[in-house]
Amino acid sequence: MKITDELVDYLGELSRLEISEEEKDGLKKDLTDILDYMDQLSQLDTKGKPELSHPFENRNCFREDVVTNGDDRQAVLSNAPAHKGDYFKVHKTVGEEV
Amino acid sequence: MSGEKQILDMTALELGQKLRTKEIGVKEAAQAYLDAIEETDGEIHSYITVMKEEALAAAESVQKKMDAGELTSPLAGVPVAIKDNMCTKGTLTSAASKILSGFVPPYDATAVTRLKEQGAVILGKVNMDEFAMGGSTETSYYGITKNPWDLKRVPGGSSGGSAAAVAAKLAPYALGSDTGGSIRQPCAFNNLTGIKPTYGAVSRYGLLAYASSLDQIGPIGRDIADCAAALSLISGKDSKDSTSIMEQSFDFSKALESGIRGKKIGLPKNYYGDGLATDVKTKILEAAQTFEALGAQVEEFELPNVDYAVPAYYIVACAEASSNLSRYDGIKYGYRSSDAENILDIYYKSRSEGFGTEVKRRIMLGSFVLSSGYFDAYYKKALQVRGMIKASFDAAFERYDMILSPVSPTTAYEIGGQISDPIAMYMADIYTVSVNLSGTPAVALPCGMDDTGLPVGMQLIGKAFSEETLVAAAAEYQRATDFHKAVAPHAAKGGRK
């Protein structure tokens, strides 16, 4: 699997990461090497084998919808890089092309 | 006083005993550790945050409750260190990442809540690889932790701060987390004992997620009895984690005495071949003989498909990481780039400046294996291999009570030795990741020293929820041997008594 500049850019977009030109060459090499290494899985015949996404069977766990945490609004908001009143503050997102 | 153990030299349970009989005060114990941290952690750097005031205040309140008979746990009043990926209300929880700089959780992780309810005194938050992605604690935003056995070497990872703190006698025990070996490998590198519990045995609520189907919290301590005591406090069902399975907590009181006579131990042949350092292999095979002498039956067998565990693991782990870490957006908490000019900028710039190289690499790998066109060849394939590996272990546990395996192909390596070669770094996880893929429990414990005097660890792997069997075997081994009692040359000295 050869990782091209275009693919690195695409993965950056999917991952919401800006990849600088200096980072790009190193990443291309590392990702190519790692994916080559991962390709050894293709030696194993998995035809018809079930996919295991989780070690044990997952079951739905229902409980009453009762609030158990206290009013920690201020503690939550104080973690935000920017907030105004009771709201998280971000740049303008409507009526602007981004 | 000569002849009597000093506070720092006691196991967590020995200290707990002295606290219950009031020979030592809870505050005195906490202060002894805080003093040791101040004196020694400058060269080890195991802590990110030392919670001095909080610890002393907690010690006072715990002492009152113990005096009133309200706290009777064997670990009541005993200090503990917490890996910095578990939320602690009111105290920085960073996962050793710049992107969580300034994050002060408004709640405690369930494992932390349970320890506090039983009177644990938290000394502080300890270092780790950024978001638990690594095996050397070198990827931490807060700097490198040194191995107390040799300051030029890594303490292992990702729970390297937890292990270095315990090995340097800067905490009697610690909590770590294990996604692909992150409790067991640092235990092996620091001559410590640790338990990676069955998936679902301990609630993950408040554990900053790396790979949710693999992550488990567990204890790191100086011997198996301390680890068992800590695990019985933190295990059990939690309504805040729907994957927590156990209705009850573990009770190891019988297991610690029940021994290993008549148990069957399997040695996977493919775990003892090329790639395993000769002196590590020798020590583990000697341990196998010790288990035989203690009454266990040991035999070699073939464990199919585990040679594919590392690539399968990294595909699954990176896929889950790329999804889990998408929450770090620079808006609700943590770091936001000051250069952002619009909403997309906030995401791109905050994440690019906030995550380290290894984390970015894994997020991008995860995005790749989940992306359209590659999903079937990588992610789906890895899930099938995961199923085949679990089936191999299930079949093995029909014949054996436990599997004896190395933890790491080598002992602790030098700082900077592997960090620039991601594949070498990933391949070193060969003996540990299968346990996470199949959800089974494992105990790591010391079994001697290599040719240069560095600790060698081994692991006992069991079927799901067989922690009691593993604890029994480890306890019997530690009664018969003294390897776990060896103390790191750079451990803190003294402590009042």
Image (cartoon, coloured by chain):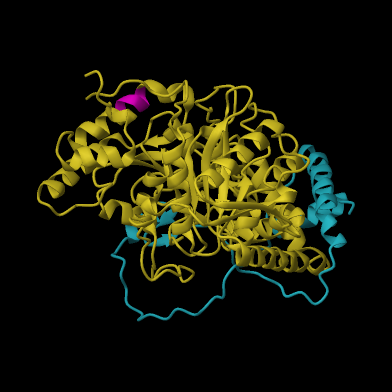
Check if residue B37 falls in the magenta segment: yes
The one of B193 and B50 positioned closer to us in this rendering = B193
| Vertical side of A2 occupied by B401: above or below | below
Q: Residue furthest top?
A: B2
The C terminus of chain A is located in which quarter? bottom right
The stretch in magenta equals B34-38
The N terminus of chain A is located in which quarter? bottom right
Residue at position x 38%, y 80% in the image = A63
Q: Quadrant of residue B173?
A: top left
Q: Position of residue B143 (x, y in %)?
A: 54, 31
Q: Position of residue B320 (x, y in %)?
A: 63, 61
The one of A20 and B447 positioned closer to us in this rendering = B447
Judge from the rendering whether residue B114 lies leftward or rightward of residue B281; answer left or right: left
Residue B122 seen anywhere in this rendered image of the structure: no
Question: What color is chain B drawn in?
Answer: yellow
Looking at the rendered structure, the number of numbered marks drawn on it comes to: 0
- Which chain is painted in cyan? A
Prevailing secondary structure class for the magenta stretch in the rendered image: helix
Residue at position x 79%, y 57% in the image = A10
Q: Position of residue B297 (x, y in %)?
A: 58, 53
Check if residue A34 falls in the magenta segment: no
Residue at position x 65%, y 69% in the image = A53
Q: Position of residue A24 (x, y in %)?
A: 80, 42
Residue B481 seen anywhere in this rendered image of the structure: yes
Judge from the rendering whether residue B52 lies leftward or rightward of residue B174; answer left or right: left
Q: Residue furthest left?
A: B68
Q: Quadrant of residue A93?
A: bottom right
| Vertical side of B368 occupied by B61: above or below | above
